[in-house]
Image: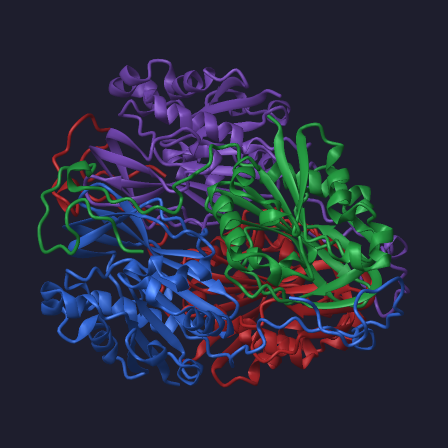
Chain colours: A red, B purple, C blue, D green
């Protein structure tokens, strides 16, 4: 069973900034796709902001098992209709990997219901990602910690809901800490937020970061059939109640009428 | 320390439907306010959809500790600007009580990030609310279960995030179950979803339901000062890093520049 | 990758009580093993209280991926040394399925840290198991609810820690509810409590209950290597600190000394 | 409503080790009691290992609202009967504050069901406690982080159950991180684990640490009456079922008989 992954990137810094282009000549999405490509159980494609419907039309999302999301400068340019569609697909069971500055994407704010704020500093300092939960599938095969020689600091408080699981916590040279690997579930969808990935450092070329991304892709994949009516609120008519039931009292809805929403 | 409560109601059924008006001649908000009024530590006012800004202008929300929300027929008529304002205030620390059909309100879907769907049946059947967590502040002084002689059935799956705490689970005569009392937190705000409260039954006149609402108002109140910058993402300049730090490597942002969002 | 399952049963009622023996002539463990046997990815054996070390010597536990536990009358007869060994193996990554009256087993009380109390009634009443979380692997392929024509009532409050996930909630003819499918994690081990399974009803012969047991066996299996030093507290000497460090101040422990426990 | 606090200490290092005695001439319990004494809503007493029943007889525990626990060298010397009694009182609603090396106490291992292991280093390095959840009652009035100039390093993985809430995460000079403030609930009892407090550094004299301890004492107090039958499993006879019920099928227990445990 191959997991179909789409790596989405706003793909702006790489075209506007020479430093970033030097690090990611094929785009950040290209580097992530290359990191995932080592795994034959993953089938990988990419999508970018500038494509029609940002490369995420309904037919494509319907056949996507796991979506990686990298955005930073253009969160506001992502169309609400595409956001709605992605959120609906997560509820139906598509996995979602939110990367680095994606913490402020419309999608992550929508799916968490939280401000998703944090503190930050761009100083090329050391980051150490500690594995908090070594038995978690996302941590499979990793050493106790991963050293990133240069990273952007993301610091607490990270204003997200209490996560289902904390997989990584980061230490920074400058003195801060950050919950850099968190899992959530919404409907049938599994969500993983992963902190590392600043565009001015070659983080997605790091083999251990690649291992995390591959592990996460497998973890996020829900093999169940899509829960397509996850947002419906069906009426259960009296005659279909599990137990025999004689209706009584006043009623607002006529029999068979749909509920309000 | 008095807790300032605003009870919000769309206030439509009571004006359009004679049955509902007969049960709630002062509106559902009036009945809830009356149930809360027994508690001198609560200061209660009401607001409705038809008021300017739905009765929830910024100044009023800023002085509200806990907001009760009852809506059903007119979820779509609630202005997005008011929704944004309420969600922001919850993140800052305002408590939120989402009642009954409010499960499909814009506010609850936004704050949970989930579809919030469920099954339903309007047959006047018996509901028994079981106290799952008798040590919880919201359950203070309650018997093991509360009997509602006539209620609307709300059934599982209730597609919300795994809650922080499950306080009540309901049994229905027709054979279904429902997690009818759930807590969540977002930012500094505490959220309680409470299932009972269908408009064609006199549920808010029940003294035990009143006790739950009073308990919940106290539980939801966060006495901390409002966390007004909960959604900001401040830069921590290198010279303010807790540990001495020499910046290195390339940088996207100029010193002092704001981050993207 | 075959999952090695051991089904443990105290195996007393079936020898002492004719009714139970009539329903489970090969023992409850035999019926559970038969229900699991349909799945070629599971390798199944059984163990009982009367065997040396209750059939759970260290070598056998070391090669067990998932342990099913059925006990009722003889919780007190289970040796503490075996309990310790099982708990250690769960921490290392062995899955644990706690069935029905196993809620009061030494193992479940130890692993949850809670009283694990509940209410009960043995009246052969109808139980409906509702799937609360249809996207969960344990619910794969199940209908919205499972009807047990005769069951023992287990009622709330079920005094366990707030679970990681609530998979099933049961409705009873007599008016109660019960969280009958709950997941927990401890160390590397996944734990599933499953309510149905009273000895005087043929519940383990029900094909849908068998499907739950098979799903749960797969879910509980942690493919990571055993975390054998999960309970160790290693000293990290100063010279092995990730960052260069000059020790300062007084110290209680001599260099290289083990910590207290 | 005054909260009755008992500060328990094994009180060995202070008598055996001159350095520790110099820092805590009145014992660690004395320093903690002094830190709490600033709050008139707390009534404070102390207890130590060498007292009869370790100073924790049943009558005293019955009138204790919150118990602080500091132990290190003599975990094994704490009598199991006292451990059972403390755990039972936590289930009934007594708050429990587990401090520093208390992570390996019998009580904490029993109440969490986990190994509670961690890594450690005694090098007098800097620790920064970051407030992860500024809106939590335990963080009231605190700055974004607390600096401890000299501390023992406690590092991840900290093998405890996924906590209800993460309040503090610590940064260490030597490169590690640690979840140093975690909440749990068991029965009616609230538990807070707090990392700082090594005996060779004057941490409990720090005013901000004192503020955390006072906040935590108030948070942990459950004002509900003690849930004294939290561990009982009452039979609900057929004639007391909420819904009329005709028993059917075979039964193991005679009417009125107690359940097995």
Query: Which residue is at a point 79% across and 51% down the rendered structure image?
Result: B235
Q: Quadrant of residue C99?
A: bottom left
> What is the x, y in percent for residue B26?
37, 14
Relative to residue A256, is residue A55 drawn left or right? right
Work out whether B211 lies above or below D153.
Answer: above
Q: Is residue B161 above or below residue A253?
A: below
Nearer to the camera, A197 or D54? D54
Q: Quadrant of the N terminus of chain B?
A: top right
Q: Quadrant of residue A253?
A: top left
Q: Is residue C47 left or right of residue D114?
A: left
**Height in image: C14 above or below C130?**
below
Residue at image point 26% right, 32% down: B151
- Residue A225 is at least partly visible in this image: no
Q: Nearer the viewer, residue B139 or B117?
A: B139
Relative to residue B165, is residue C252 drawn left or right? Answer: right
Q: Quadrant of residue C39?
A: bottom left
Residue D232 showing in the rendered view: yes
Q: Is residue A104 left or right of residue A248?
A: right
Q: Position of residue C143 (x, y in %)?
A: 24, 60
Image coords of residue C224 (percent x, y): 50, 79
Residue B76: give x, y in percent of width and height: 43, 36
Task: Report the front residue among B104 and C30.
Answer: C30
Count of labels in the image:
0
């Amino acid at each position: 069973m191959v997991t179909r992954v789409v790596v989405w990137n706003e793909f702006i810094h790489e075209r506007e900034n020479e430093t970033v282009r030097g690090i990611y000549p094929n785009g950040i999405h290209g580097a992530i796709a290359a990191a995932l490509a080592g795994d034959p159980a993953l089938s990988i494609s990419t999508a970018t902001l500038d494509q029609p419907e940002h490369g995420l039309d309904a037919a494509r999302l319907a056949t996507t098992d796991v979506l990686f999301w990298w955005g930073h400068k253009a969160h506001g340019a992502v169309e609400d209709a595409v956001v709605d569609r992605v959120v609906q697909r997560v509820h139906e069971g598509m996995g979602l990997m939110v990367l680095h500055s994606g913490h402020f994407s419309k999608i992550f704010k929508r799916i968490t219901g939280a401000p998703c704020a944090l503190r930050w500093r761009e100083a090329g300092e050391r980051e150490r990602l500690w594995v908090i939960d070594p038995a978690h599938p996302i941590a499979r095969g990793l050493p106790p910690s991963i050293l990133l020689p240069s990273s952007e600091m993301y610091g607490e408080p990270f204003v997200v809901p209490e996560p289902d699981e904390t997989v990584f916590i980061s230490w920074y040279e400058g003195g801060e800490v950050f919950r850099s690997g968190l899992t959530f579930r919404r409907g049938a969808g599994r969500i993983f937020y992963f902190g590392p990935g600043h565009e001015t450092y070659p983080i997605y070329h790091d083999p251990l970061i690649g291992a995390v991304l591959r592990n996460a892709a497998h973890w996020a994949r829900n093999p169940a059939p899509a829960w397509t009516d996850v947002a419906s609120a069906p009426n259960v008519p009296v005659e279909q109640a599990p137990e025999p039931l004689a209706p009584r009292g006043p009623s607002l809805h006529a029999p068979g009428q749909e509920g309000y929403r």
